[in-house]
Image (cartoon, coloured by chain):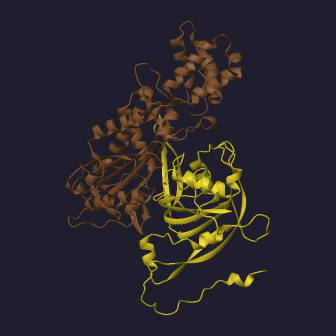
């Protein structure tokens, strides 16, 4: 099993999971369908092509910089008559940075890494108008699992954001990983498991995800001794383990 | 496989303006690098670019968006084969268009009833959705219809003929469709994947929207009723914008097909489209509130890169907002940032086989001068078009 790490950073991104018609919302973190779509496009697969191998990859994402949600109001005009068409609302995540990971067969992971370096279709972060502002591919890990790779990767937040948190030597980042199939792991469900990107019948299945957090060092932390010991980590859910 | 990707980067300063506003009338914005930036949405600039095509390209290179495709096709059929009479041509056209696009082509019931009541002839059939077809697609379909004119229904039942009809509707798109994509609402088979990707333009610096309070005097005011005829506010900002678009030239070529005329090279359609896109994207401006602010500006800097592996946006160069320089503007610092960032990121990711053109205006942009071949806009579009055509030449 190998793990491919991706950096999803851009001035705007948008990851919809239940968005239809005139109101296009975004989740607060990249969806599996969105990232698998990015990988499939990099490989040059067409929308109707089979994607079982990609959909079977285990997916996880780390929130390095949560960003802000912004709303875009979009008008459209008729091509001939210039009459106004229905307005639509589009939501974007502005200023966000994520590290996403997919885990699976080593050969496929290597192929995907190569595809990202010379993508067949232009890459974008959830919506065409959101190009990545930095190259997407990071590294391939062969020895650590999905969780390990996400925990070990350096913090990719922007410098201004790291500086803002300079009082903290390490920062806690939210990690959302897909539960191993088969296990009846309790967790949230998301409808972003891609089944088909065929525009005639796009289909998504349910996926179980678990949210945890990892601590990563802050490279811009003030080296001078911190004021006092930070408050203890408060996570009431730990008590519920095994319930 | 050799790849051809074109990146267009623009720095453009706009004085007080409201190019693109939201539903409350404020100029659109985004947060980047932790501060508020001016934003002009991608669709606003795509529309402006498309508008510019009307002056740059021949109408035959552009698409027609209409429900009345059958009538247009019927005219071409009659032109091609004058022995086919008008009603027959219309029937041929309707059948062919239906087979090619998968859309139902029928006489709208309301119009048919109205005509019957008045005792007029049946009106021509229409599609229920607006179709976007190019002149070259109409020509292809007309030839096909003439070929099967003897018994069009049987002709189109033959799988190879039907596939051929579909292929005509799915290749040789007009320049605007090939660049920006198309939707045919009830036939997803012939959607076109846009060859361009236009990012939202954002300011390289922090922006606060300002608001202008105005009064307007009624010229026919009497002394009995002095004061303003109306009052109001209009919001605006001024910004130095970073604009970015990527163009997948290989996809563009697949969308457009190859040139058919014997006196021109096969790559001519692509060259024309690239020429028009770079020109249109660089020189156009969304028209929002332009009569209020008169903010007609042209870019101060245009960097075009011809790449072989992947597109690279330089937005991250401006993630840390640019501060005003000693002269009070943002352009000089923005150019310094770009001049440092571009070689840096290209070295880090090992992309060095690119061709770069640079168009720059004024002393503030001098820092960029080492970045590429310096050109004027006419030279730029000609050089880019020629370079792209050269790369796509068969055998390369």
Check the image and name the residue furthest to the bottom.
A228
For residue A99, above or below residue A125? below
Can you give x and y, in whole percent of width and height, for residue B355 in the image? 36, 45
Residue B76: percent from left, percent from top: 52, 17
Image vertical order of residue B133 relative to residue A210, above or below: above
**Residue B142 image offset from top left, x and y in percent:** 56, 18
Chain letter corresponding to the colour brown: B
Task: Write the residue at 21% across / 56% down.
Answer: B223
Q: Is residue B101 left or right of residue B53?
A: right
Viewer-proximal residue, B48 or A236? A236
Q: Is residue A232 left or right of residue B389?
A: right
Q: In terms of image quadrants, where is residue B129?
A: top right
Q: Nearest the camera: A130 or B4?
A: B4
Q: Which chain is yellow?
A: A
Q: Residue at x 58, y 53 (%)?
A: A38
Residue A69 appearing in the image: yes
Residue at position x 54%, y 53% in the image:
A116
Is residue A194 shown to the viewer in this render? no
Front-lying residue, B231 or B267:
B267
- Please give the count of numbered marks on the rendered protein: 0
B60, above or below B386, in the image: above
Nearer to the camera, B103 or B333: B333
Picture quadrant of residue A100: bottom right
In the figure, A238 relative to B251: above or below?
below
- Indicate the position of residue A149 as horizontal and vertical percent values: 61, 69
């Amino acid at each position: 099993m190998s793990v491919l790490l991706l950096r999803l950073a851009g001035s705007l991104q948008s990851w919809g999971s239940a968005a239809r018609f005139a109101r296009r919302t975004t989740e607060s973190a990249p969806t599996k369908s969105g990232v698998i779509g990015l990988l499939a496009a990099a490989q040059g697969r067409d929308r109707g092509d089979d994607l079982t191998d990609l959909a079977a990859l285990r997916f996880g994402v780390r929130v390095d910089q949560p960003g802000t949600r912004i709303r875009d109001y979009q008008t459209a005009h008729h091509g001939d008559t210039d009459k106004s068409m229905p307005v639509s609302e589009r939501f974007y995540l502005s200023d966000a940075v994520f590290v996403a990971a997919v885990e699976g067969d080593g050969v496929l992971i290597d192929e995907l890494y190569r595809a990202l370096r010379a993508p067949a279709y232009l890459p974008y972060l959830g919506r065409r108008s959101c190009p990545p502002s930095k190259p997407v591919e990071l590294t391939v890990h062969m020895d650590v699992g999905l969780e390990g790779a996400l925990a070990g990767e350096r913090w990719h937040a922007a410098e201004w954001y790291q500086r803002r948190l300079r009082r903290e030597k390490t920062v806690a980042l939210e990690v959302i990983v897909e539960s191993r199939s088969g296990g009846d792991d309790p967790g949230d469900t998301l409808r972003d498991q891609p089944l088909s990107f065929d525009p005639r019948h796009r289909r998504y299945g349910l996926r179980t995800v678990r949210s945890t957090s990892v601590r990563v060092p802050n490279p811009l932390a003030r080296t001078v001794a911190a004021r006092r010991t930070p408050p203890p980590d408060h996570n009431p859910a730990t008590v519920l383990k095994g319930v | 496989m050799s790849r051809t990707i074109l990146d267009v980067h623009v720095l453009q300063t706009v004085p007080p303006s409201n190019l693109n506003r939201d539903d409350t009338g404020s100029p659109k914005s985004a947060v980047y690098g932790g501060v508020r930036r001016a934003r002009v949405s991608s669709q606003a600039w795509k529309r402006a670019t498309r508008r510019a095509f009307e002056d740059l390209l021949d109408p035959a290179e552009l698409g027609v968006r209409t429900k009345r495709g059958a009538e247009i096709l019927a005219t071409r059929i009659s032109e091609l084969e004058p022995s086919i009479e008008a009603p027959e041509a219309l029937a041929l056209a309707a059948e062919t268009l239906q087979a090619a696009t998968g859309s139902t082509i029928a006489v709208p019931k309301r119009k048919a009833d109205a005509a019957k009541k008045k005792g007029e002839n049946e009106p021509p059939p229409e599609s229920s959705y607006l179709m976007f077809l190019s002149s070259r697609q109409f020509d292809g379909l007309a030839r096909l219809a003439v070929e099967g004119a003897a018994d069009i229904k049987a002709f189109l039942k033959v799988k190879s003929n039907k596939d051929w009809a579909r292929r005509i509707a799915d290749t040789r798109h007009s320049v605007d469709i090939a660049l920006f994509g198309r939707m045919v609402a009830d036939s997803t088979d012939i959607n076109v994947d846009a060859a361009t990707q236009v990012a939202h333009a954002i300011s390289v610096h922090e922006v606060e929207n300002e608001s202008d309070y105005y009064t307007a005097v009624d010229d026919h005011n009497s002394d009995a009723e002095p004061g303003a005829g109306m009052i109001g506010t209009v919001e605006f900002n001024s910004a130095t914008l970073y604009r970015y678009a990527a163009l997948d030239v290989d996809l563009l070529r697949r969308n457009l097909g190859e040139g058919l005329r014997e006196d021109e090279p096969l790559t001519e359609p692509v060259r024309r489209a690239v020429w028009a896109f770079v020109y249109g994207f660089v020189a156009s401006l969304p028209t929002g509130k332009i009569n209020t602010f008169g903010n007609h500006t042209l870019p101060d800097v245009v960097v075009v890169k011809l790449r072989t592996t992947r597109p690279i946006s330089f937005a991250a160069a401006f993630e840390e907002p640019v501060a005003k320089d000693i002269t009070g503007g943002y352009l000089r610092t923005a150019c310094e940032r770009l001049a440092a960032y571009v070689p840096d990121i290209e070295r880090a990711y090992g992309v060095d086989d690119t061709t770069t053109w640079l168009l720059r205006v004024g002393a503030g942009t001098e820092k960029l001068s080492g970045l590429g071949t310096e050109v004027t806009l006419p030279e730029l579009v000609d050089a880019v078009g020629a370079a792209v055509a050269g790369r796509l030449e068969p055998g390369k």
